[in-house]
Structure formats: structure tokens, C-alpha cells
Image (tube, grey):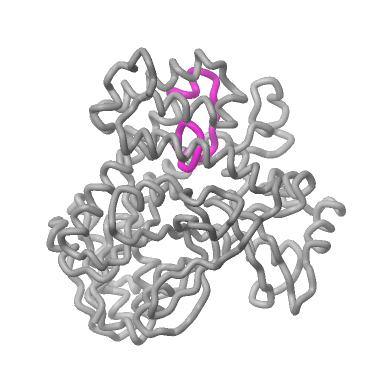
Amino acid sequence: MAKITFIGAGSTVFAQNLLGDILSYPELAHSEIWLYDIDAERLSTSEIVARKIAAFLKISPKIIATTDRDRALDGADYAINMIQVGGYKPCTVTDFEIPKKYGLRQTIADTLGIGGIMRALRTIPVQLEMVHDMERLCPDVLHLNYVNPMAMNVWALNRGSSVRTVGLCHSVRGTAAQLAKDIGVPAGDINYVAAGINHIAFYLKFEKDGRDLYPEIRKVLAEGRVPADNRVRYDLLKRFGYFVTESSEHFSEYVPWYIHRERPDLIEEFNIPLDEYIRRCEVHIADWEKTQAEMEDPNTVIEAKRSSEYASEIIHSSETGVSRVVYANVINKGSISNLPADCCVEVPCLVDKNGVQPVQIGEIPIHLAALMQTSINVQRLTVEAALTGKREHVYHAAMLDPHTAAELSVDQIWSLVDDLIEEHGSWLPGALHEPLREAAE
């Protein structure tokens, strides 16, 4: 019987999706489900949801909710991590509002850019504490990370710990379904291969019964049928020849071309939703009390509906030996031969009793690798800053970020970094608050 621990289980809606996925497998129906969070109230709601899902499925798993991390992790076979360090307030608001004073505009700010850099710097130390606990309490655990910025977190955790950490994101599967809808082909009929880095992976193949579907995708562009919320990605298809796996609002802030200080008209032309993550957070917060009340209502039935997340599939395959392919974020080690061996890549992985095994992709098109490298540079420097506490690496990461450089001068970037570090205060490691040394090492 597997022990499955949810870290940050107070993310109730997301936990609900994963619980429904896991418990709907008969082989996992009697697992030990441990729900851990530092917020006792949110944790209580998640426990109620878990028990209602079990009741709907007519099963009796062992469900334990606790605010004691050691108890939750002790002997765990799988740990699913979905925390957010600093929350919407103060940290997410800080990541948007201070850059905005400098004229730096963002959409999601959780993966790359100055927002992604700061999120990594406050998240990686907390996650390192967790995986060091895992080394002590459950050294053979498979740590499934859903926390952004995905690539930076997975890279840092695999460098800083012996625990197996694999990152999971639904963008590859989700975008494939969107593309299938755009071209009028059932999603289940499509076979694809994607590879790259998280949020900047591309479909190298997109086929049905061996027939290339890229001509059908290009017809959407040629015939003016591009969905209004997907203009950036279809424009990138025109320029690069391949379709990227993450949404247009995300991708617009990973490159210097769509949000640019000298071309404010591009925001409307490409329908770029500035401050989108802020809006989503505010809607979620405004709706939470109502959602919580509905979930806790004794008369509310919570059904187990399968989501597009990979966690349950990985756990099921690892436990049963059923082979399947998922997309996961792992350390490269040559999976993509023309990207750095030590960076974090998103590639297809075979999962069975032997665990998560990355597929060898080989070389990807040179221009796609070059585009990814611009983000890998930022990721590497941010990971280095988080692991060493050297403030100079934060400046360098921000300077090399493509979107930040398109909006701000070098002096502005350095000043912005100073302001963000000061405003984040104790959310960041103390070493990052030390003045910059005269001679950077």
C-alpha cells in the first residue's frame, strides 16, 4: 500500500483534481493519503474534499491531515509538491507592482522574467528544506513537483539533494488538445512528440495515423482562424515553423518581441493580457469563501473526475508496472543533445516499475535550441544565486532575461533588482541582502 503525501494540500481545488485521479485507480484505492499544509483551515477543507471523493468512489483509503511535516513525510513513497511561497500577498503583488513602476509589464510572471526570478529565489530554499527532510525520512521517495518556476526548481533540487525530483506540467497535453480543436481532429487520434524546456517546448511531430498535421495547423493561420487568445503562438509558428507548448499569455513574456517599450501597439495587436495572473488570483480569492462553503456542505457530493495531470499516471505505473509515456521535467543528461547536459528539460518519459525514464530525443532544430538557451541562461544564474546566495547572479539573470532587456536599461534593471530584494525582505535568504562585492567572482 503506497503512502502518498500532498505538500501544500491547502491548494484545495488542485488537490481535489489529483485526489480524484489517484483514487479512481482500483490499484491505488487503498493508498495512504497524507495531506500536509501550514494553513490548518485550508487543510481541513481539503480533508473534507478527500473524504467526499472516497465516498463517491465507495472506497476506504486511509486519509490523514496534519500540519506536522515530519509525520507527513515519514516513509512516504510519493510526495506531490504544490506549495506557493509568499502567496498572492505579499509576494505575487510585489513581483508585479514594483516592476510596473519601472515600466516593466508582465502577464503571468511565474516562470521566467523578473517575476519568475524572484519566485525562484524565495521558493528554492523552502523546497530544499523539504527535500532534505525527505533525505532523512523517506530517502527513496519520488518527489513530484508542480511548483513554479518549474525548470529552476527542478534544476536546483536535483543539484542540492539526492532525492529524485521530477517536475510535472500539463501544458504539453493541454496544448495538444487545443490544437486538435483548432484543426478539427479528435484529440485522442493525435500522436505527437514534443521536447524542449518547460513552457518553451515545441511539437517536433504532430500526426494522425502517420500523416503530418502541421499543414492543417498552418491553414488555421493562413485562413485567419487563429483564436484571439492564441495570436502570439501562431505568430511564432509563422516565424519558427513549430508550435510551442505553452499559452500565448505565458510565452509573450519569455521573448523580447511582443511586449516592447517601443511598440505599445503590439499589446492590442496580439491580444496580450497584461497583469493576467493578478486578475486570476483576485477572482479565485473572491470566490474562495463560496467555494469552501460548497465543498464543506454535508449535502455536496464531490465527484472524482479525471484531469489532465500526470501525477496519478506516474504513481499507477510505478506501482503496477503498466507502461505509459508522460511528459516530465528532468535533468537533461543528454536527452536533448544540443542543450546543456545539466539543465532541466521537458521530454517524453517512459514510466513503469523502473520509475521515470527520459526518452533520448537527440538534436532538436538549431533555432529552437538557440531560443531555449536564452531562457536556460536566466535559469542557470537564478539557480546559482539561490544555491550560493551570491547577489551578483540575480543582477546577471535579470540582465540576460529577454523580456526585461526589451523594456528596461541596465541601470533600471539593477535598481529594480535592489528594490525587489529589499521589498521581499525575509522571504529571501539573508545572503541575498548582503551588498554586492566590488569584484564579482
Residue 76 is situated, as x and y percent measured from the top left of the image, at 22, 68
Q: Is residue 198 left or right of residue 138?
A: right
Which quadrant does the N terminus fall into?
bottom left
User: In the picture, which quadrant includes the C terminus?
Assistant: top left
Quarter of the rendering containing residue 281: top left
Q: Residue at x 40, y 51 (%)?
A: 154
Please say if 209 is above or below 408. below
82 lies above or below 274 = below
Horizontal side of 441 relative to 183 (left or right) equals left
- Looking at the image, which residue is at 50% across and 66% down? 358
- Residue range (magenta): 98-116
Q: Residue at x 48, y 18 (%)?
A: 101
Query: Which residue is farthest right?
Result: 223
Q: Is residue 111 magenta?
A: yes
Is residue 382 visible from the viewing direction of this image?
yes
Q: Nearer the viewer, residue 416 or 385?
A: 385
From the top left corner, tell me how far across and down residue 430 is, in percent: 23, 28
Please tell me which residue lies in front, 98 or 329.
329
Residue at 34 percent across and 86 percent down: it is 27
Residue 392 lies in quadrant: top left
Q: Is residue 233 left or right of residue 427?
A: right
Count of marks, rendered view: 0
185 left or right of 372? right
Q: Is residue 46 magenta?
A: no
From the viewer's perspective, is residue 12 above or below residue 264?
below
Q: Position of residue 248 (x, y in %)?
A: 63, 46
- Residue 157 drawn at (x, y percent): 34, 50
Within the image, what quadrant is residue 261 found in? top right
